[in-house]
């Protein structure tokens, strides 16, 4: 199959968020977003104060969520 025109799938994701600790307004890029450990949520760390803040999954693209979920660490269940 041949792609005739690229869709939105490969477009880079960028979002604007406020830090809940210091209230700085930040431009968050894909590389800033991390998956949380053992939960289906995401976060970034404020570059002004160093505190983490939540990134709602509904604000992320499906492509980015799939990429981040592959990096998520789950505890071993023995």
Image (cartoon, rainbow, N blue to C red):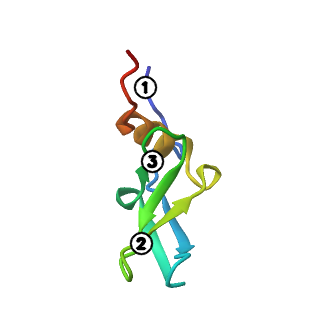
Q: Earlier in the sequence, mark 3 or mark 1?
A: 1
x%, y% of residue 34? Answer: 40, 52
Foreground of the two, 19 or 76? 76
Q: Earlier in the sequence, mark 3 or mark 2?
A: 3
Q: Quadrant of residue 69?
A: top left
> In 3D space, how far apart are the residues under numbered discs 3 and 1 (Cα atoms)?
37 Å
Give the residue drawn at x 36%, y 75%.
Answer: 50
Mark sitting on residue 38: none
Q: Position of residue 73 (x, y in %)?
A: 36, 35
Is the residue marked by circle 2 packed among few (<14), some (14-19), or many (20+) residues within 10 Å?
few
Q: Secondary structure at mark 1?
A: loop
Which residue is identified by label 2? 51
- Specify whether residue 34 is in view: yes
The residue that appears at 46% across and 52% down in the rendered structure is 11
The reply to whether residue 6 is visible in this rendering is no
Residue 74 in which image quadrant: top left
Q: Nearer the viewer, mark 3 or mark 1?
A: 3
Local packing at callout 1 (Cα closer than 10 Å; few below 14, some 14-19, many 20+) is: few
Furthest residue to the top? 78
Q: Quadrant of the N terminus?
A: top left
What separation in Å lies between label 3 and label 2 (alpha carbons)? 14 Å
Q: Which comes before the other along the chain, label 2 or label 1?
A: 1
Residue bearing mark 3: 36
Q: Which residue is mark 1?
A: 2
């Amino acid at each position: 199959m041949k792609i005739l025109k690229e869709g939105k799938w490969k477009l880079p994701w960028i979002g604007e968020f406020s830090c809940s600790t210091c209230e700085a307004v930040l431009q968050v890029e894909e590389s800033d977003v991390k998956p949380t450990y053992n939960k289906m949520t995401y976060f970034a760390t404020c570059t002004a104060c160093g505190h983490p803040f939540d990134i709602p999954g509904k604000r992320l693209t499906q492509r980015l969520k799939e990429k981040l979920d592959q990096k998520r660490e789950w505890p071993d269940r023995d």
